[in-house]
Amino acid sequence: PPGWGPPALRCRPCRVVAGHGDLGKYLTVEQLRDLVRPSPATLVTVLKWLRGHGVEDCRSVATLDFLECSITAERLLPGAEFHRYVKGQRSVIRSPQPYSVPEELAEHIDFVGGLHRFPAERSVVSRAWAKEGMESHGQRAAFHLGVMPSVIRKRYNMTKGDIGLLPNNSQACAQFLEQYFHQADLAVFMKLFGSSFAHHTEVDRVVGHQGQGRAGLEASLDVEYIMSTGANISTWVFSNAGRHESQEPFLAWLLLLSNMSALPWVHSVSYGDDEDSLSQVYLQRVNVEFMKAAARGLTVLFASGDDGAGCRRVPGGNHTFRPSFPASSPYVTTVGGTSFKNPFLVTTEVTDYISGGGFSNVFPMPDYQVDAVRSFLRSAPKLPPSSYYNSSGRAYPDLAALSDNYWVVTNRLPLPWVSGTSVSTGPSGRGAGPRSARC
Ligand SMILES: *[C@@H]1O[C@H](CO)[C@@H](O)[C@H](O)[C@H]1NC(C)=O
Ligand SMILES: *[C@@H]1O[C@H](CO)[C@@H](O)[C@H](O)[C@H]1NC(C)=O
Ligand SMILES: *[C@@H]1O[C@H](CO)[C@@H](O)[C@H](O)[C@H]1NC(C)=O
Ligand SMILES: *[C@@H]1O[C@H](CO)[C@@H](O)[C@H](O)[C@H]1NC(C)=O
Ligand SMILES: *[C@@H]1O[C@H](CO)[C@@H](O)[C@H](O)[C@H]1NC(C)=O
Ligand SMILES: *[C@@H]1O[C@H](CO)[C@@H](O)[C@H](O)[C@H]1NC(C)=O
């Protein structure tokens, strides 16, 4: 059972980091462990429960607040009865029956997941894609040459000197769903587009499994653009292989972060789920993981999603917008998308119509954005009816950058017209407001 720490973390580390005078005084993984480690009572109760079912083979993480064990879940969660469900290529294991947990354990477990909920239809809400079919962008082809590092650097006023200068700068992106990058693609990309700034041509470290086979578009662009805006900076890739049968693909990655003492400072992630497809207890626990990362001084950037405000259809009721998570977490920095107003020139940007944005239905609005959001809601010219969104929630994105018409090298070939807020999440620019979508 992940997360048997008491909810002590809910406030403490945020105060440690954000309190006046404490800014920048980040915690080591050992200090974090002392803050989040389970109480002796929790440990005794949980270990007794596990041992009572013959579970001995468990691995902990450095912060001690996760325990990973191989278990026979049907025995541990009485009532549960697992079956394999198949849909097309996908297969998941779920229990159609209710389960129970001994009462004395309830206060020691944050959530039970992966038993009942089926994966959402679209588990990736933010992901780059290449536009296809000449007819649709025959016109676009006549527009400017597309976004490449020189265009981003020009637009965001980055000079030759705006590169990493210290050896302890570091950054990473996390990949899921069998997305792999190729070092050779990065080399071709830098040869084509990297001549005007100092840069690295290799990813320094892959954490996890880097599979063979074709490169993924998402992985290629994440690596190529983080390394050309965060140029001359040591870069890692966290490669989380395999499709998780549950809806919780972030846990494996977050567990890894909790188990490593030396980590890159900046993490960029282009991945998310519909907020309402996840249980609230799970959302709260993942949010705590983001607080832990923040307390260590890590910056975690998430793409805001590519479906505008999203749409949740309510049969017989009123439709509402549909926020995505982790974009909606107040403990990450969420990045939306823009496109050039004049597609011929490197000029001002407007909101990219795909850019995810909206309000969380789970996390209340944090203090730091109250003024900005209130003034946006007061002055925005054409807001959708307020019944579509929950303006008491955390608003996102926090900032936005170009997300349209990128060049990406993948499987040795330069590919134009790649779009998605995932491409803006590496380089981060100026703000854009949430926009309405058809719903
Ligand atoms: C955490 O790291 C330690 C030491 O590197 C390892 O023994 C342990 O198995 C890891 N825990 C998990 C859950 O992977
Ligand atoms: C870049 O510099 C120009 C001229 O100083 C300024 O007008 C513009 O706002 C700057 N752009 C950004 C993204 O900071
Ligand atoms: C790149 O970063 C290294 C430190 O990691 C620094 O020594 C070097 O001067 C930087 N390169 C340039 C061209 O500034
Ligand atoms: C990074 O390196 C510089 C110079 O080597 C040093 O002054 C600084 O304290 C280091 N910062 C961190 C966060 O380790
Ligand atoms: C749908 O919205 C309308 C107008 O805002 C409201 O009168 C009605 O009660 C709503 N219906 C439901 C089921 O919430
Ligand atoms: C609106 O958001 C708040 C959090 O700010 C939440 O407590 C509340 O349940 C949400 N309302 C709806 C209808 O989802």
Image: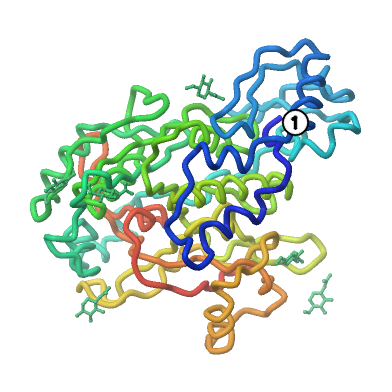
**The quadrant where residue 401 appears:** bottom left
Does residue 55 appear left or right of residue 208 in this picture?
right
Q: Looking at the image, which residue is at 58% across and 53% down?
A: 13
| Quarter of the image where one finds residue 366 | bottom right
Say what secondary structure mark 1 lies in.
Answer: helix
In this figure, which residue is indicated by the disc labeled 1? 40
Q: In x, y percent, where is residue 78?
A: 88, 23
- Quadrant location of the C terminus? bottom right
Q: Residue at x 26, y 61 (%)?
A: 138
Q: Is residue 13 above or below residue 76?
A: below
**Residue at 76% from the left image edge and 61% from the top image edge:** 314
Quarter of the displayed picture in which ligand 5 can be seen: bottom right
As drawn, which residue projects farthest toward the left? 195
Residue at image location 21% in from the left, 56% down from the top: 148
Crowd around label 1: few <14 · some 14–19 · many ≥20 (10 Å): few
Amino acid, disc 1: Pro
